[in-house]
Image (cartoon, helix red, strand yellow):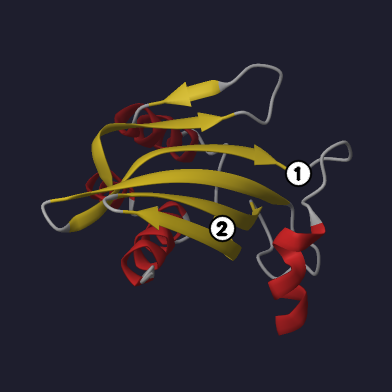
Amino acid sequence: MDTTAIDLLTKDFYNSISFENAEPPELAAVKILFFGEGILINNSFSKPITFTVESFIDAVKVKVADGSIEQFMEREIHSKTEIFGKVAQRVSVYEYNFADHAMPRLPKGINFIQFICTEGKWRILSMAWFDENENHLIPREYLHSQLMNN
């Protein structure tokens, strides 16, 4: 099972939403990574926050414009992808930060991403994520490969 295209697509997504103070995020790139309107759900709070690709991009633009987000970094630290025909799902463990990207212990979460292959290209169909907290820690098996690489 070759996951190279999905690996790159996932990396492109995280790169497109990450930015530093002097550089605005590459939000136009986000839209081309998705199939159709896409759906993104942040389920880290008491109620899910649901976005289409457009509303996600708009929400980030507003937060950047009003200064409530000056920089952001999110990167995948572990993944597991399953493919069957022209559908795939990925467990993507990420770390993120709104300030110092080199902190020794960054906050983490898990993003469940669904993909479809259409016209010979993989596209993101949907994603739902949950940030780690004191009541929900990332399972050790999802961090095992990261620990071995350090």
Q: Which residue is located at x 80 percent, y 63 percent?
A: 105
- Check residue 38 in the rendering and tell me which mark sits there, or answer none: none
**5 to the left or right of 69:** left
**Furthest residue to the left?**
119
In percent of width and height, residue 18 lies at 48, 57
Image vertical order of residue 108 relative to residue 143, above or below: above
In percent of width and height, residue 92 lies at 56, 55
Image vertical order of residue 105 relative to residue 147, above or below: above
One can see residue 150 in this view = no
Question: For the residue labelled by badge 2, is the local secondary structure a helix, a strand or a loop?
Answer: strand
Q: Of label 1 and label 2, which has the lower sequence position?
A: 2
Residue wearing tag 2: 73
Q: Which residue is located at x 41 percent, y 66 percent?
A: 7
Give the image quarter of residue 104. bottom right
Asked whether 103 or 14 is in front, the reply is 14
The mark closer to the camera, 1 or 2, is 1
Image vertical order of residue 36 relative to residue 81, above or below: above
Q: How many marks?
A: 2
CA–CA distance in space, label 1 to label 2? 16 Å
- Check residue 132 in the rendering and tell me which mark sits there, or answer none: 1
Asked whether 79 or 54 is in front, the reply is 79
Q: Amino acid at mark 1?
A: Glu
Question: For the residue labelled by badge 1, is the local secondary structure a helix, a strand or a loop?
Answer: loop
**Furthest residue to the right?**
134
In percent of width and height, residue 54 lies at 30, 31
Q: Which residue is located at x 35 percent, y 27 percent?
A: 52
- Crowdedness of circle 1 by 10 Å Cα count: few (<14), some, many (20+)? some
**105 to the left or right of 9:** right
**51 to the left or right of 136:** left
- Could you tell me which quadrant the C terminus lies in? bottom right
In percent of width and height, residue 37 lies at 26, 30
One can see residue 104 in this view = yes
